[in-house]
Every structure is written in C-alpha cells, then in structure tokens.
Amino acid sequence: MGPAKIFGAGISVALLATASPIAQSLPDQGTIGGILNPIGNVISNLTAPINNEVLPGVTFLLSNFTATTYTGTATSCDMNAADEYSTTSPEAVGIDSHKLKAALSYAAVDGSFSTKVFRNGCEVGQGFRDALMDRVPSLNAGQTKAIVALIAGIVADRGWVDLDAPIDDYVEPGLGDAAHRSRTLRQFMQLTSGAQVNHVSGLNLFADISRTREYFSSTLQYPAGTYYQFDEITPSVVVYCLERAIQKAMGTNIDFQTFAQLALFDPLGIPTSAYFWQKDRSGVTTGYSGLWLRPLEFGRIGLMLLNNGTFGGCRILSEDFVQSMRQGTTANCGFGLYVSLNSCQPGQTQVSTDYPSRSTLPGEEWIQSAPNDMYYSLGLGTNTFVIPSLNMVVTRDGYQELDIVPGAVSGSLNGAFPGNAGGPGEHEFFRLLMASITNMPTSVRATIQNSGPYDRPANENVTVAPFILPLSAPLGTYTAIGPHGPVGCNALYCPSSSNDGLTWLGQVPRVIPGLVGLESRPSGCEAQFTGNVDLPDITIFGEPVFGDTETS
C-alpha cells in the first residue's frame, strides 16, 4: 500500500470516528469508543467551522471534500470501448443529486479510494478521491476470481472447455489422484470442491510456489458440490486448466494473460497500462487474487455484465453464461460463479465466508438495503455491484472495507473483519444510495429487505480450524516441505512448469503511462479476438501472437 493510500485510510478512520453517532455515544474507557472518541473530538474541533451538513451515520466536510456529479440531459448512454465513460446528470436518469452526493461522500469518508455510480449506461457521480486514485492499479484481491470466471465463460462459450467435465480432461497426465481430478471447474468456481482449506497458506499473497499442485496435496473433506467454503487455492487450478485448454484449442503456447487481454480486456477497452497480474513461482497466473487493476476500469466490467455480456457493440460473453453466474447452489444460495448474490430466499441454505467465523444464515439478502437481484464481486474492499432491476452499476475500491470501521465501532467482530458481505458500512452506503433514486419501481422497492438502519445482531464467533489446520499447510505453501506442500515441487522449482513466476514484475513499469493518461484504449470490436489462429496481424508488444510465434 502506497503512502497516499496509508494516509487516506488513516484519515478515513478519523473522519468516520468523528462522524459516527455510535462512536460518540460509546463510553470513553474500556471499549473501542475509548480509542475513537478522543480522535473524534479532536477532528470535530478542527473541522467544526466547515461541517455544514449532518446525515445519519456520517458528518460530511462538504466545503473541502465533495463528491462529483455531472451535468447533462441524456437519459441513457452508449459508449465505444476506445472512449471514456459517457456522463449525464443524476436527475436525467432518476437520481437526486444531493442524496447521491451524500452516499458517495459516505463511501469516501469510509475508506473508499474510488466509488462510481452508473445508471442507464451513464456515469452520474464519483467520490471525492476518484480524481486522485482511480488510475492507480489496486490489488483486486477476491475480485480477481470474478475476472477468472469471465475468462472461463469466454473459453466455455467457444467450446474449448466443459465447465461440468472432470478436470481430468485438462490436467497433465500423472498429476494428482483420481479423486482430485474428478472435480469440475464449475464446482471450483462455486467454491464447493470439498477440499480442506487453510487460510494462513491461502493468504500467502507473494510467495506461493504452485497453487495448482497444492490442491493436489489437499485433503478432500466433503463430497464435491455439497459444502461451500471460501477458498484461495482452487481458483488457480481453474486458471491452470483454462490455459491448457486454450493452448490445446489454439495450437500455440499462448499465455493465460495474453489470452485475457485479447479476448476480454481488448473488447472492454482496457489497455495493458491499466493493470499487472501476479503469477505463482511455477508460472501459473494467480486466480484467487493478484490482479492489480485500476478502479477506473471496474465500470466497464459491470456494464458488460449489466448488458448480459455485450459492451460497445461487442458480444464478449454469452447471455447464458452471464445468467449462470447468478445461480446459487444448494450448498450456498448466496454465491454463484465467483460472485456474491443478494437473492437468497427464506429456507435456502446461505453460508458466510469463515473470516473469521463460518455462519449459516436463514436465507436473506447479504446487503439488506439493496434490491435482491443485485450481484457483485467480493474483494478486499474491491467490488463491482450490478443491479439489473435498476439498470445500475456501482463500483468501489479501497483496502479499508466499508464495513471495517462501522463494524468495529458497533462491536461486531464479523463486521470489522475483512472478507465478509453485508456489514453495517455496506448497508448504510446502499441505504443512502437507494434513497437517492426518485423513480424506483414499487416492485423493486418491495425486494429491499431493510431500508432503515442496520439491525443485524453482532457476531463475535471465530471459527478457528480453517486458520490452523492442517498444521503443516503454511510450511508447505512457503517451502514445499511436508505433506501439504505442492506435489512434486521444491522451494524453487516444479516439474513440467515454466517456473517463470517472477516475470510478472516486469509488467509493473507498463502502468506508468496509464497513471497520467498517456495511453490509447483498445478499439473494442475492431480488436476483438475471435479465436481464429490465422490472425497474424494481432500482436502483443509488437510481436505476433499466432502463426509460428509462441508467446510464453
């Protein structure tokens, strides 16, 4: 995290501490309020002359920091991939500007480096930090999984992979046993592989040797498809299998990231200067995290999903695949294909991540202040929210999740712990945002479970096992020593792998032009990759991808 982001996070904590009536009502000693109240009192005294508006949950310093809303009369917008977002006034698409600014300011004060709201294809507003931060590549954490799901859909739509076939069809001969090879890519993307999870090894963000081979050394605790558990290992198995399927179909040693640029990012108008993407040491692109994509691009992903797989006139994904992403499972109604679903109904099985405790809910919306057709990526403060019933996309970035400070202030451990959905901060943001919509259909409003203050009971439970068992898992992931290390690997090398896992560091300088906007965007459909291997004019960094040239 850079200095600007550290400073921003600190200011967010202080401002929210100042703002929150909960914090100000807590006793000064022996609680979180004892820490936050003095900070809040100091900041309040310093900012009292410019505090000109108070809304529930937050004091907005509007004279110095204010969200941006746009002007215009367009009631809907189209855009080409090579263009920046089209904008219009909130009122033109049925949103109250004043109330929208309240929601955006709440998000910014609560640690958001970027927050953008789109309706009917138009950007209508952004937070007060966006101008500074939205071109800075950010660790997308769990949102990386959603990007992997999109690429899986592209490959499946081409018929190059069957998401319901055993991965035995795509894994190199001799790697792993029959039971591990019998799981499917769909089960991996639904997080129902049944493999034992250790979060200490799973959150090894920079030193993992081979996530794929770690999976093959894991214990299979549950029958496939029957048990949901948040998992940071199997998403990289998905990437591994997809890359092998792509290479087989194309007859070339094309790298997963090169394919992703051609088949997904180019049609979306996302240049290589907008991101870099980590690999593990064996050379496989990390699927669970590791994509550093700037927040400016999240809206393109959301708008493509909102339009059922099309963007700028390009068909990127089939409508069937987009709809399949939104289907929950009997193991967890609140999770689809690497996206969280707000659509659970009473009586269905709904399971939280076990950060820090595994909880079974009665079947309800994760974010009770938002419509129940909303679905979204769940990263470490990085989200792309899609609300089809309102023709709306909301994007958010910030390492300090919306729920962390409100959760801590209200005394909810699960609300304050990263990696959960539907805590008090998200609830308040969407409560404010939904209040800004002036033309919400009655049928949509009826799906919002709670338009009032957050009222879930505090959850102080901790599920210890996924953080400590198996005991040898952390040692295995870092050193390849022990029964849960990556199969066949040592600390430096894995057989039959490229072992070029540090080459991604060479991508980092390419984002510099993007930081200041000295770049051109891909032209969408004109650059769209069709999968035809006889396309020698398609190049990456000036080198042909196809023909006799192999890209590694």
Image (spheres, grey):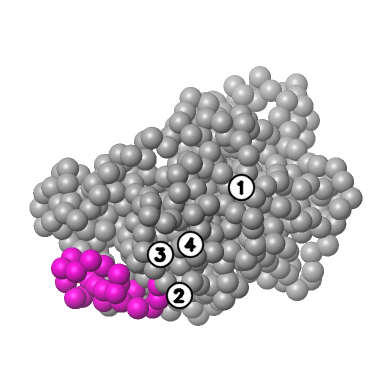
Amino acid bearing label 3: Met
Residue 522 is labelled as 1
**Circle 3 or circle 1, nearest the eye:** 3
Q: Which residue is mark 4?
A: 534
Residue 159 is labelled as 2
Q: Nearer the viewer, residue 365 or 81?
A: 81
Q: Which residue is mark 3?
A: 250
Q: Earlier in the sequence, mark 3 or mark 2?
A: 2
Q: Earlier in the sequence, mark 3 or mark 1?
A: 3
**Element type where label 3 sits in the image:** helix
Q: Residue at x 45, y 31 (%)?
A: 509
| Quarter occupied by residue 160 | bottom left
Amino acid bearing label 4: Asp
**Residue 534, image x, y percentages:** 48, 62
Q: Nearer the viewer, residue 152 or 103?
A: 152
Query: For the residue carrying disc 2, how many other residues have a C-alpha within 10 Å: few (<14), some (14-19), or many (20+)?
Result: few
Query: For the residue carrying disc 1, how many other residues have a C-alpha within 10 Å: few (<14), some (14-19), or many (20+)?
Result: many
CB atoms at circles 2 and 1 under 8 Å apart? no
Q: Is residue 164 magenta?
A: yes
